[in-house]
Amino acid sequence: MAQHHTHPHDHTHPDWVAMARLLERHAEITSPTYTRAAAWLAENRPAPRRIVDVGSGPGVVTCLLAETFPGAEVVAVDAEEPLLERTRARAARTGLGERVRTHRAELPSGLDTLDPADLLWVGKSLHHVGDQRAGLTALAGVLAPGGLLALLEGGLPARVLPRDIGIGRPGLQSRLDAAEDEAFTEMRAALPGAKDETEDWPALLSAAGLRPSGTRTFLLDLPAPLSGPAREHAVASFTRRREALADRLAEDDRAVLDHLLDPTDPASLHHRPDAFLLAAQTFHTATKEG
């Protein structure tokens, strides 16, 4: 299970105001991935009139979709008003305010008031729904006949450092991934109406009445040494993992994380010349018969 490693999570009750900048930075750093994915979608849906970005966060992808599809209205859907405020501000700042609007709603219950969409972008939000099968069925109901659903789930855990970093035991990131897997499983189990589901996304899209039309994975490859913004993102990401996973990690791994996050330590993420960012994100698409 790797789908949760490529964007930040708080497995309890997130403070969305505090998380907004982290989410925004993450989307900005990984925007080349989203740009290529959007171009791929444009090959099949060259001129959608209405796009809905479900689980839009701070609106980085919402605005990217508006830029990729200049004839479309784009609706950002999120449950958190602080994130929708960020979306409106970004749209206004980038000259997209007339074509971008926001809609506050929970997934999937708040979707039934939306007008049909020609393109539905569901980025890392479905796994926050207890019954993912029912969630996909609700999403399918938002699609117009002939519409395309793009589901971002899956991929591979991001890597930022070599396996052996010269501090502590090799394989730190693999152990962080294992701890996040445990936390993610507990988060899923605590969701209202939670149901276990084999994460065969094309099969689930078929079960929702859609016709799977393709799966493609896009690579984010930022080699060492990292630029300033990408390095800041890596530090922020590891800081959150240190806070969120502390009780799940061995004492020596916590100590290594403290070294990696200490700006006065030459071996920290703040200064290491070998820090990079490598991640893979998978998109599954399906269409609604017209």
Image (spheres, rainbow, N blue to C red):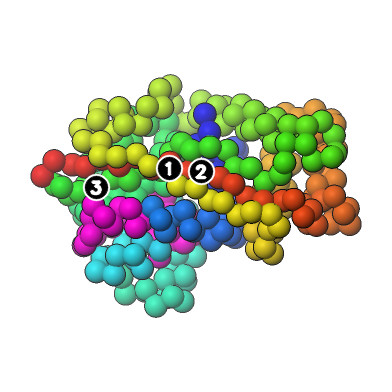
Q: Disc 3 designates what residue?
A: 148
* Amino acid type, label 1: Thr
Q: Disc 2 designates what residue?
A: 280
The answer to whether mark 2 and mark 3 are in CB contact below 8 A is no
* Disc assigned to residue 217: 1
- Please state the horizontal and vertical placement of residue 50, each as a whole percent of the image: 24, 60
Image quadrant occupied by the C terminus: top left
* Separation of residues labelled 1 and 3 (CA atoms): 17 Å
The answer to whether mark 1 and mark 3 are in CB contact below 8 A is no
Q: In this view, does 182 lie to the left or right of 72?
A: right
The answer to whether residue 17 is seen in the rendering is no
* Amino acid type, label 2: Ala
Q: In this view, does 14 lie above or below 171?
A: below
* Amino acid type, label 3: Leu
The answer to whether mark 1 and mark 2 are in CB contact below 8 A is yes
- Please state the horizontal and vertical placement of residue 120, each as a whole percent of the image: 29, 50
Q: Quadrant of residue 241?
A: top right
Residue bounds of the magenta highlight:
38-63
